[in-house]
Amino acid sequence: MYQIILIENSKKIKVLYTYSREYDALYRLTNLGNKKIFFPKKQVYKNKILTKVIYHVLLIKKRTEKDKSVTVRDNYGKLLESFMGDPNWVVLGKIDYNIEEQFNVTGANRKLNALEIINNVLMPNLSDKNPKQVVILNNKLIIEGITLNMVTCKDITEARRLYNKLRTYCFEEKTIPPNNIIFFGTVPKKNKRLWYKKITTLTGVSHNRLYRTSSR
């Protein structure tokens, strides 16, 4: 039996796939290694603390008497001894892995990743008569045209990272007229109260939530 398992910060999170044939397992591992991620997850909350995360995927098989694990290390060079020395499983391979980050967006009935935000929030109905502006408000991105949507990030750093990703995408996408999406950066402190009032009126989001600079 072969398993492909997800590792977060050198700890097993879950089994992604199970196979009976090595060929099938290796094929899947190769596909996972080639998977393109647009905006990777960099941090998660653990025990209420925002923690940096690094993901890997391991290919393991049921151990037999003569099996020996390949040498695997984390990103800091430390041996993953708990996996290499497992009495029941032997490690056949390891790849770096990324997971798409997802965000709460007002008006959406589920979390959206960055590409879905582009395709379903930023780009729809874009025109000279409906230009859109994007601003950073604490740990939120505000996308406003005829309608207003708020994207909530884990903290201010993530909000800036997402903002820069959207701005770079729009700059590189030559089909988008430059004046149809305007990126205004961070809302100045003197203007925040006006934005709080507008967002609460249009979305129903409370002021307490808007004041926060981090969210789970």
Image (cartoon, rainbow, N blue to C red):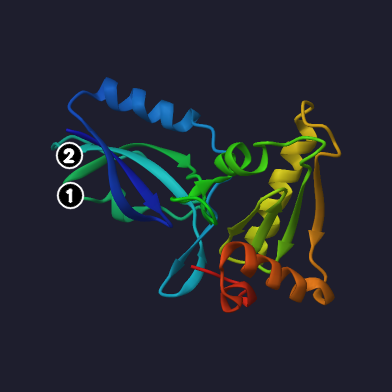
- In the image, residue 67 lies at what x, y percent? 21, 35
Q: Name the quadrant of the N terminus.
A: top left
Give 20 or 198, whichever is nearer the viewer.
198
Q: Label 1 amino acid?
A: Pro
Q: Earlier in the sequence, mark 2 or mark 1?
A: 2
Question: Residue 62's spot in the image, x, y percent?
Answer: 17, 38
Q: Which residue is mark 2?
A: 63
Distance in Å between CA atoms under marks 2 and 1? 7 Å
- What residue do we see at 76% from left, 72% from top? 194
Q: Is residue 71 something that shows in the picture? A: no
Answer above or below: position of 214 versus 88. below
101, above or below 94, in the image: below
Tag shown at residue 87: 1
**Alpha-carbon neighbours of circle 1 within 10 Å: few (<14), some, or many (≥20)?**
few
Asked if marks 2 and 1 touch (Cβ < 8 Å), the reply is yes
**Between 193 and 80, which is closer to the camera in this rendering?**
193
